[in-house]
Image: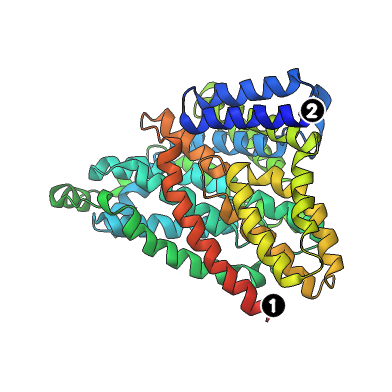
């Protein structure tokens, strides 16, 4: 009975988030409160469980990176990058989007996708303002690109870290097996952008001419603070990439970087935390509690086991089912708790289908389905939620359906292209 009540509460909260009848933070907190009220979860599980509670690694990773970005913003470096990007694109909107998409996808493969959108969003606002362009299409394209690019590496998307830990996979395994496909998907995505966002590509010759006369170096307001911030950011990036060697969680790295930056510079604590997206962090906490309740009551496990039960050891069928089911479920629930729940089941399926040899394709199906499926809706991946939070804070809110109508198309195309890739490379 509790499981059914938990499902009903989750569906109600999700409907409110999707229809925007109430603010998404209120819907998430209300849903979390109901889960606690009906005993679908409890305080110990919600706050301290590794698999069915709030993922504090995600919360504190976001907090640390938001503080670093807040300090960087004071240096004028985002104005510098905005002018530089606009000049390289010669004021042409589509060229600008291509440049931003490539930068975002590439950076997401080295950093995590959430960090990347936190860094690129301020640049996007500034350059769109300079060229009188609507900012929403560019932010949506960057969120989608970050999820695609982040699929390529172990550190690019949080679900990949979970998969690597459970499957005993290395950084190089992800590069060898997923990066070639992701390069193709980014190229296809750029082509989709030309069609999906075509109404946003209005060229203004006068504003483009004004941009070309600007000197981007004049935008730097504090060179000393810039070098200090870049040094800390470089160390944080290096620690992210070296996670398999150093074994420091990204959240710990981000918090250490933020602490060092605030302590070692003239920036005050108040200035450092001014740019923190508190509503986004609270929304994530509520969402984790709701999904954790579904995990705690066994709902997600039953769904996963039902999917596994119909495969009967058929590797090709299991791979395709896992790919598409993961994409569909990750569009509804955040892909981090989904992968945390599904990975033990996949580990058993891998062993039943040849272990580290042929069965390893199931890990790549899970990664592609969960990471690319996260693009389908505004709450499918952490990067999407962060982008919506930044947009709302800057006075240009993006609705759930405005994001989702683009995300569904991109998800279907990218997952459809992943299907023959897995089939031809691993199953034939």
Q: Is residue 178 above or below residue 62?
A: below
Image position, residue 404 (x, y; %) = 46, 44
User: Given the current orientation, which residue lies at the most extreme left position?
Assistant: 206
- Relative depth, front residue between 73 and 38: 38
Image position, residue 97 (x, y; %) = 35, 55
Which of discs 2 and 1 lies nearer the camera? The answer is 2
Q: Is residue 58 above or below residue 161?
A: above
Image position, residue 114 (x, y; %) = 56, 45
- Residue at position x 53%, y 21% in the image: 270
- Relative depth, front residue between 346 and 275: 346
Q: Secondary structure at mark 1?
A: helix
- Residue at position x 47%, y 24% in the image: 21
Q: Secondary structure at mark 2?
A: loop
Task: Tell me, yes or no, if residue 245 can be seen here.
Answer: no
Q: Is residue 403 above or below residue 297?
A: below
Residue at numbered disc 2: 1
Q: Is residue 56 above or below residue 119?
A: above
Image position, residue 343 (x, y; %) = 78, 53
- Residue at position x 66%, y 72% in the image: 176
Q: Residues within 10 Å of mark 1 (few under 14, many from 20)?
A: some
Q: CA distance from mark 2 to mark 1?
A: 42 Å
> Does residue 258 appear left or right of residue 168 in this picture?
left
Query: Of the numbered discs in the image, which one, if any, rests on residue 427?
Result: 1
Task: Tell me, yes or no, if residue 28 can be seen here.
Answer: yes
> Does residue 117 appear left or right of residue 111 in this picture?
left
User: Given the current orientation, which residue lies at the most extreme bottom position?
Assistant: 428
- Residue at position x 54%, y 53% in the image: 147
Q: Residues within 10 Å of mark 2 (few under 14, many from 20)?
A: few
Query: Of the numbered discs in the image, which one, if any, rests on residue 259?
Result: none
Q: Point out the tag, 2 or 1, that comes first from the N-terminus.
A: 2
- Relative depth, front residue between 384 and 2: 2
């Amino acid at each position: 009975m509790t499981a059914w009540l938990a499902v009903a509460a989750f569906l109600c909260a999700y409907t409110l988030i999707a229809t925007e009848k109430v603010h998404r933070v209120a819907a998430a907190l209300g849903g979390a409160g109901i889960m606690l009220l009906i005993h679908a979860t409890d305080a110990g599980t919600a706050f301290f469980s590794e698999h069915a509670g709030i993922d504090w690694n995600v919360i504190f990773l976001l907090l640390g990176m938001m503080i670093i970005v807040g300090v960087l913003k004071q240096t004028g470096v985002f104005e510098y990058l905005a002018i530089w990007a606009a000049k390289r694109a010669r004021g042409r909107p589509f060229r600008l989007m291509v440049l931003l998409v490539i930068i975002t996808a590439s950076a997401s493969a080295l950093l995590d996708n959430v960090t990347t959108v936190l860094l690129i969003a301020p640049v996007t606002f500034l350059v769109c303002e300079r060229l009188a362009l609507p900012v929403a299409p560019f932010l949506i394209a960057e969120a989608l690109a970050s999820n695609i690019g982040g699929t390529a590496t172990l550190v690019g998307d949080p679900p990949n870290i979970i998969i690597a830990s459970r499957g005993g996979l290395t950084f190089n395994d992800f590069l060898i097996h997923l990066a070639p496909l992701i390069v193709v998907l980014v190229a296809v995505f750029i082509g989709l952008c030309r069609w999906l966002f075509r109404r946003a590509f209005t060229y203004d010759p006068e504003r483009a001419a004004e941009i070309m006369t600007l000197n981007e170096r004049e935008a730097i307001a504090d060179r000393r603070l810039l070098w200090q911030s870049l040094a800390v950011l470089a160390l944080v990036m290096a620690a992210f990439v070296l996670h398999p060697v150093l074994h420091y969680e990204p959240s710990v790295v981000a918090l250490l970087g933020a602490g060092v930056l605030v302590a070692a510079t003239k920036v005050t604590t108040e200035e450092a935390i001014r740019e923190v997206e508190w509503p986004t962090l609270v929304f994530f906490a509520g969402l984790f509690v709701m999904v954790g309740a579904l995990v705690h009551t066994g709902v997600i496990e039953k769904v996963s086991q039902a999917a596994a039960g119909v495969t009967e050891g058929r590797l090709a069928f299991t791979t395709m089912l896992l790919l598409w089911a993961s994409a569909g479920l990750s569009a509804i629930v955040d892909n981090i708790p989904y992968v945390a729940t599904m990975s033990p089941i996949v580990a058993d399926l891998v062993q039943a289908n040849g272990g580290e040899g042929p069965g390893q394709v199931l890990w790549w199906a899970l990664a592609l389905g969960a990471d690319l499926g996260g693009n389908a809706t505004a709450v499918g991946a952490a990067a999407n939620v962060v982008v919506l939070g930044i947009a709302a804070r800057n006075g240009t809110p993006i609705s759930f359906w405005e994001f989702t109508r683009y995300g569904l198309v991109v998800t279907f195309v990218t997952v459809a292209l992943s299907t023959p890739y897995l089939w031809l490379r691993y199953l034939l």
